[in-house]
Image (cartoon, rainbow, N blue to C red):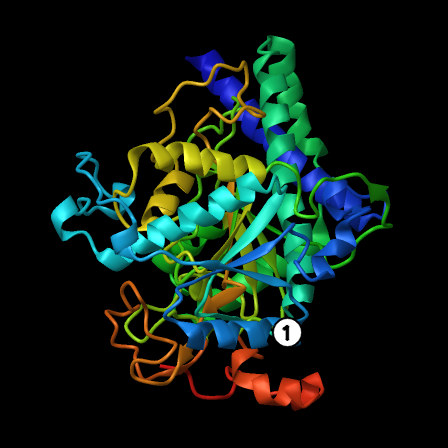
């Protein structure tokens, strides 16, 4: 037992070394790890498909209003959108009872007779989009619902997100390698080295000091400046690494995707997500890797495209996002998908699309698509099917997913402001549909939909309307 505890301690010391030394390396301009290197296709993030091999918009033939709005938004944003005809519930085979529950959501799956026709059609439409990506042989594809909106600065936001996702994937990979090495050297000598490592870890003063001061301000401003409040912040924020503000020299590397090469789902648009809590147990080095086991969070401080904390809620009847109480104002955070709802926008790799089709194509519709995707990303289905490969990383058969998300979301639901208009959900409106009649887009400051006339007229960015100014009223 004592040897096991010593080994576990060495693992955590080693992880701290990896986290701190890599970032210290950057701050001293001694080079940079792979996630800050600019690959040959890194500039593709700024292209007409945001660095993916296609952008697909799901649209019902009966919602021409939404198609027109999306086509115009794509045009002024320099995006090449491919519209896929959405399916109605009647065109999707009736679901059968599987006896499965809605996973971590805590509610039982609806029986076949009471399943929402809209939800069934949405599920079929998303399956169709995934199948399209697989059939076309695309390395990746971005799937959008047709009632979304984004900031006019989306391309530069995505460039930062690409760097952050590469950082997340790289740190997790290095962490697993370090754990694996430690586990192979459980000797007394290794344990003694672990004791010396702690004193050798260099002090990474710049970013750490900034983060510590920032959290103190957050605790004071959010009313969490107490023992319990600080415990809450530490519980969710302890495993956070800030994206360095000063990067070392840029080198060219080869990557298949500017977002990294080992992801399945990038959940970019949602109407709520949970921050992963700090893990109390030792992370695993086993393959295949599931992002559901990670509490790593990468923070992007001082992002002027992020609204002030008072604006961070998805609909009128939601609580303010926990993000607003834990991190400084204007902070965006990238982490493993956790508790996400609403499948407004997500990218899939070819591998990820195949995994999703394998998992859900066999069982058919069970419950709402976004909840099914949420549960899969959170490891609800891990281990249900065996994989024939040794590690399972390159085979389609294994069940684990690597899903990343971002808070606040980069793409959000647009409320057009009319009863029965483009903002009315074909499934279930957020907030029980009681947000109807509202106009605007939560989480998005320089809204494309809100500035369409100005953008068409050629107005510069400084003459566009900020719908969520720091000193302005909230949407709700």
Q: Secondary structure at mark 1?
A: helix
Above or below: residue 106 compared with residue 414: above
Nearer to me, 85 or 185: 85
Circle 1 Cα neighbour tier, 10 Å, few/some/many (<14 / 14–19 / ≥20) = some
Above or below: residue 94 compared with residue 161: above
Q: Quadrant of the N terminus?
A: top left
Above or below: residue 98 compared with residue 325: above
Residue 230's image quarter?
Answer: bottom left
Q: Is residue 465 visible?
A: no
Percent coordinates x, y for residue 185 in the rendering: 62, 11
Which residue is at a point 36% across and 70% down the rendered structure image? 62
Q: Is residue 72 visible?
A: yes
Nearer to me, 365 or 338: 365
Percent coordinates x, y for residue 366 in the rendering: 25, 42
Which residue is at a point 60% across and 12% down the rendered structure image? 184
Which residue is at a point 31% across and 54% down the rendered structure image? 121
Percent coordinates x, y for residue 245 in the rendering: 73, 59
Q: Quadrant of the C terminus?
A: bottom left
Residue 451's image quarter?
Answer: bottom right
Residue 305 is left or right of residue 277, and the answer is right
Residue 303 is left or right of residue 92, and the answer is right
The residue furthest top is 187
Name the residue that disc number 1 marks: 75
Above or below: residue 377 compared with residue 8: below
Which residue is at a point 72% across and 44% down the rendered structure image? 35
Percent coordinates x, y for residue 57 in the rendering: 50, 61
């Amino acid at each position: 037992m004592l040897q096991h505890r010593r080994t576990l301690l060495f693992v955590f010391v080693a992880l701290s070394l990896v986290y701190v030394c890599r970032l210290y390396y950057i701050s001293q301009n001694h080079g940079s790890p792979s996630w800050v290197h600019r690959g040959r296709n890194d500039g593709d993030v700024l292209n007409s498909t945001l660095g993916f091999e296609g952008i697909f918009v799901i649209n019902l033939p009966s919602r021409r209003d939404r198609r027109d709005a999306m086509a115009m938004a794509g045009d002024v944003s320099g995006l090449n959108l491919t519209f896929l005809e959405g399916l109605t519930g009647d065109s999707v085979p009736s679901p059968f009872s599987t006896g499965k529950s809605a996973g971590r959501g805590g509610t039982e799956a609806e029986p076949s007779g009471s399943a929402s026709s809209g939800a069934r059609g949405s599920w079929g439409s998303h399956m169709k989009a995934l199948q399209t990506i697989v059939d076309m042989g695309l390395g990746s594809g971005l799937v959008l619902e047709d009632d979304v909106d984004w900031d006019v600065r989306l391309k530069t936001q995505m460039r930062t997100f690409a760097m952050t996702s590469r950082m997340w994937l790289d740190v997790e990979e290095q962490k697993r390698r370090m754990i694996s090495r430690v586990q192979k050297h459980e000797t007394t000598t290794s344990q003694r080295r672990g004791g010396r490592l702690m004193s050798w870890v260099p002090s990474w003063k710049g970013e750490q000091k900034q983060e510590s001061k920032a959290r103190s301000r957050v605790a004071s401003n959010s009313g969490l400046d107490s023992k319990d409040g600080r415990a809450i912040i530490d519980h969710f924020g302890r495993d956070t690494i800030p994206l360095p503000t000063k990067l070392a020299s840029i080198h060219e590397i080869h990557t298949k995707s500017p977002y990294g090469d080992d992801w399945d789902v990038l959940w970019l648009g949602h109407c709520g997500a949970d921050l992963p809590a700090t893990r109390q147990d030792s992370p695993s080095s086993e393959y295949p890797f599931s992002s559901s086991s990670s509490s790593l969070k990468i923070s992007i401080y001082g992002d002027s495209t992020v609204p002030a904390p008072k604006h961070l809620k998805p609909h009128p009847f939601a609580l303010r996002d926990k993000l607003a109480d834990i991190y400084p104002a204007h902070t965006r955070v990238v982490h493993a998908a956790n508790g996400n709802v609403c499948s407004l926008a997500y990218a899939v790799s070819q591998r990820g699309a195949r995994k999703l089709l394998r998992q859900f194509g066999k069982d058919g519709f069970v419950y709402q698509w976004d909840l099914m995707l949420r549960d899969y990303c959170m490891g609800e289905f891990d281990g249900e099917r065996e994989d024939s490969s040794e590690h399972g990383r390159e085979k389609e058969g294994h069940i684990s997913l690597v899903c990343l998300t971002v808070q606040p979301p980069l793409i959000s639901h647009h409320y057009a402001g009319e009863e029965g208009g483009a903002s009315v959900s074909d499934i279930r409106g957020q907030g029980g549909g009681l947000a109807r009649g509202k106009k605007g887009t939560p989480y998005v400051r320089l809204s494309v939909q809100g500035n369409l006339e100005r953008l068409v007229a050629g107005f510069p960015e400084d003459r566009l309307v900020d719908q969520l100014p720091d000193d302005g009223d909230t949407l709700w």
